[in-house]
Image (cartoon, helix red, strand yellow):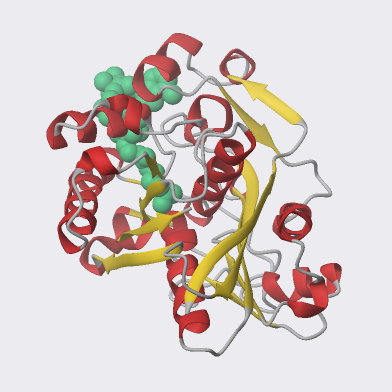
Amino acid sequence: MEARITGVGSYTPERRVTNDELAQTLDTSDEWIRSHTGIRARHIAAPNEAASDLGAIASARALEASGVGPGEIDLILLATSTPDYQGLPSTASVVQDRLGCENAGAMDLVAACTGFVYGLETAHAYTRAGLARHVLVVGAEVYSRIVDWSDRSTCILFGDGAGACVVSAAEGEGRGIVDSVLKSRGSDAESLYRPRGGTRSPLPAGERADRDTYLKMDGRRVYVFAVSVLVDIIRRLLERNNLSIDEVDYIVPHQANMRIIEAAAKRADIPLEKFYTNLQEYANTSAASIPIALDEMNRAELLHPGSTVLTIGFGAGLAYGGNLIRW
Ligand code: ACO
C-alpha cells in the first residue's frame, strides 16, 4: 500500500507587505532585508483571520484537487505553532467542522517549521498500516500574531499562510511518500521559543503581555543549525534510498532564509537551481512553507507523476527532518 499525494492546495492572505512598508515604522531597509534574507514581501492575515481560516481554504482547495469528498477523510493532521486557541480546542477540530469532514479524527501537530514534514510521515504511517484511506495534512500559520513587531531581527522574517495535501492509500505504482527522517535537538529548544504564556511561565490574569510573550530567537545559532541539518537530511535520504542527487528533480526546503539555502547548497555541492524557493514573496510561513511551495510548483507544472522531490524542514524544537516523495 502506498501513501500517495492526490491533491494539494494553498492560501495566502490578500494583504502584501513589502520591505519598504516595514521600513516606514521599523529601523530597517529593503536593502538590509533582501541582502540578509532574500525576502522582498510577506502576506499578513486580516484581523478577523486566524490559522483555521487560512487552513480551511487551503484544505478545501486540496480536497477539490484530489476529488476526495470531505466525508471520505479519515484523519486531519494540522501542523501549527500559531493555533486559533491556546492548546484547546485543536485548530484541526475547527477545520474539520468547517469542511464538513464528519467522519474524520482531528488533531494538531506541533513541530514548528518541521510540522508539515512530520505530518506527511504520520499520514504515510496511517495509510501504509491500513488505518486510514485518506488523510488531510495541513500547515497553517499566523506568525504575524506572535512576532514582536518592534524587534527588527525577527519580525521581518515571517509571513502568514496555509498549505494542505490529501494523502491517499493507493496500490503499487511506486508513487507517494517513500521515506522520511524525523529528528529533534531538544537541548537547543530555547534558541527559538516564546518564553512566556505557557505553563512554565504563565501570564497571570490582569497582567499585560510583555516582550517575552512573543517569539524570541538566537538568529546566529538557528542559522548554523539550519545549514548543517539541511545538508545532513539531504545526505541521509539519498544514502538510505540509494539515490544520487542527479536523480532528484527538486529539493523543497523550509523557506526561512535564502542565505541558509545558499550555504547548504554550497556545502553539499548541489546546484542552487535544484532548490525551489518562494520565500522572496511569502517570507517564512513556518509549517505552511513547504505545502505552499508544493502547490505553487504543481500549478506551474514543475511536478509530474514520478518526479522525485525531497522536502526538508528545520526550526523550533529544534526539530528537523525530511520526506522523499515520488510525485
Ligand atoms: N534591519 C537592519 N539591521 C538589522 C536588522 C534589520 N531587520 N536585523 C538585525 N539588524 C542588525 C543587527 O542589529 C546587527 O547590528 P549591529 O552589528 O550594529 O549589532 C546587524 O544587523 C547584524 O545582525 P546579525 O543578527 O548578526 O545579522 P545576521 O547576518 O546574522 O542575520 C538573521 C540575522 C537574518 C536573523 C540570521 O541570523 C538568520 O537568518 N538566522 C536564522 C533565522 C531563521 O531562519 N529562523 C527561522 C527558523 S524556522 C522556525 O522554526 C520559526
For residue 62, side relative to residue 223 (left or right): right
Height in image: 134 above or below 22? below
- How many numbered circles does the render carry? 0
Q: Residue at x 60, y 31 (%)?
A: 300
Q: Position of residue 149 (x, y in %)?
A: 57, 35
Q: Nearer the viewer, residue 29 or 172?
A: 172
Q: Quadrant of residue 121?
A: bottom left
Q: Position of residue 303 (x, y in %)?
A: 51, 41
For residue 214, side relative to residue 322 (left or right): right
Q: Residue at x 21, y 32 (%)?
A: 270
Q: Position of residue 99 (x, y in %)?
A: 83, 68
Q: Quadrant of residue 67?
A: bottom right
Residue 101, can we see it?
A: yes
For residue 12, side relative to residue 2 (left or right): right
Q: Nearer the viewer, residue 132 or 82?
A: 132
Q: Position of residue 81 (x, y in %)?
A: 54, 61
Q: Residue at x 43, y 33 (%)?
A: 276
For the view shown, which residue lies furthest in the front direction? 173
Q: Quadrant of residue 148?
A: top right
Height in image: 92 above or below 59? below
Q: Can you tell me which quadrant of the image ligand 1 is in?
A: top left
Residue 216, can we see it?
A: no
Q: Residue at x 21, y 67 (%)?
A: 187
